[in-house]
Image (cartoon, rainbow, N blue to C red):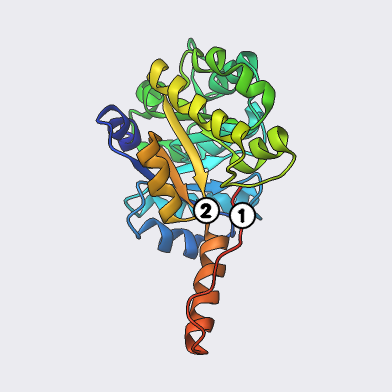
Amino acid sequence: MRKNRLKTAFRENTPIINGWLAIPSGYSAEIIGHQGYDAVTVDLQHGMIDFASALTMLQALSATPAVPLVRVADNNPAQIMRVLDAGAYGAICPMISSAEQARRFVAACRYPPLGVRSFGPARGLLYGGSDYPQHANDEILTLAMIETREGLANLDAILDTDGLDGVFIGPNDLSLTLTGSASAESRHPEMLAAVDKVIERCHKHQKMAGIFCTSGAAAAERIAQGFHFVTPANDVMQLGRASREAIALARGNGIPATGASGY
């Protein structure tokens, strides 16, 4: 089976730069996959993407160096199994707030006896190789999103989940629940403490710490903080930012300040 390079990078303490797709387009997925990202995530939660579009995007990503991932809409075993069968090499699951929720998520990603994933790898065989069924439990990446006060309180128990590779902070939702305001780059003391806690506990448990960022500069700061997996904005934010900059430069106004939030 094709090795999951993200797991190798984590073991070697090499930062993982992850692209993020919210626009349903195989062509844009192919473009993003060739830009140098270690991984690219197809977003089924907040992106404008259905399963048919996700399938074409995963097919496009398969022809690029980037490892294809999917953020599922929720902790639904049927959807999780379907995107893995479609060739995703990992799943990011939102709103994981307890160890039991984390266990159910991981179980959907693992074949028996380690989980409850139903057999029918389909494109998994095409992308991963003919021996995919024998090694998928070791290679599929599982990241649980920490986005609630309850999830933060249960962080150690979540990280103790067998088969969970790490956690991924949804900064807007976590900021919203902690401070009442959605801000991906919040400097609120409670949010800063929460981020520090996730980094510290992930390092203690030897699990991957990930976070969504609003820019490449913000992602570099998060890597310096100790994050292993960073997403420097998504395609919508990057398209808007590049367009604003091009228009401002064409009009001789200089590069405008950015105000888009991440999610």
Q: How many numbered tags mark residues here?
A: 2
Quadrant of the image occupied by residue 179: top right
Q: Quadrant of the N terminus?
A: top left
Give the camera-side residue of 81 and 241. 241
Residue appearing at x 57%, y 62% in the figure: 236
Residue appearing at x 61%, y 16% in the figure: 154
Residue neighbourhood size for the residue with mark 2, other residues' Cα within 10 Å, grouped as few (<14), some (14–19), many (≥20): many
On the image, the x and y values in percent for residue 78 come to 64, 30
Examine the rendered structure and indicate whether residue 263 appears above or below residue 84: below
Examine the rendered structure and indicate whether residue 91 appears above or below residue 18: above
Q: Residue furthest right?
A: 180
Identify residue for label 2.
214
Examine the rendered structure and indicate whether residue 60 appears above or below residue 230: below
From mark 1 to mark 2, how far is it between C-alphas? 6 Å
On the image, the x and y values in percent for residue 204 come to 40, 16
Identify residue for label 1.
261
Give the camera-side residue of 189 and 1. 189
Q: Residue furthest top?
A: 113
**What amino acid is found at the position of numbered circle 1 in the picture?**
Ser
Q: Are marks 1 and 2 in contact (CB under 8 Å)?
A: yes
Q: Earlier in the sequence, mark 1 or mark 2?
A: 2
**What amino acid is found at the position of numbered circle 2 in the picture?**
Thr
Q: Which mark is residue 54?
A: none
Whether residue 50 is visible here, answered yes or no, is yes
Q: Residue furthest left?
A: 12
Residue appearing at x 65%, y 29% in the figure: 75
Q: Which element type, helix, strand or loop, lies under badge 1?
A: loop
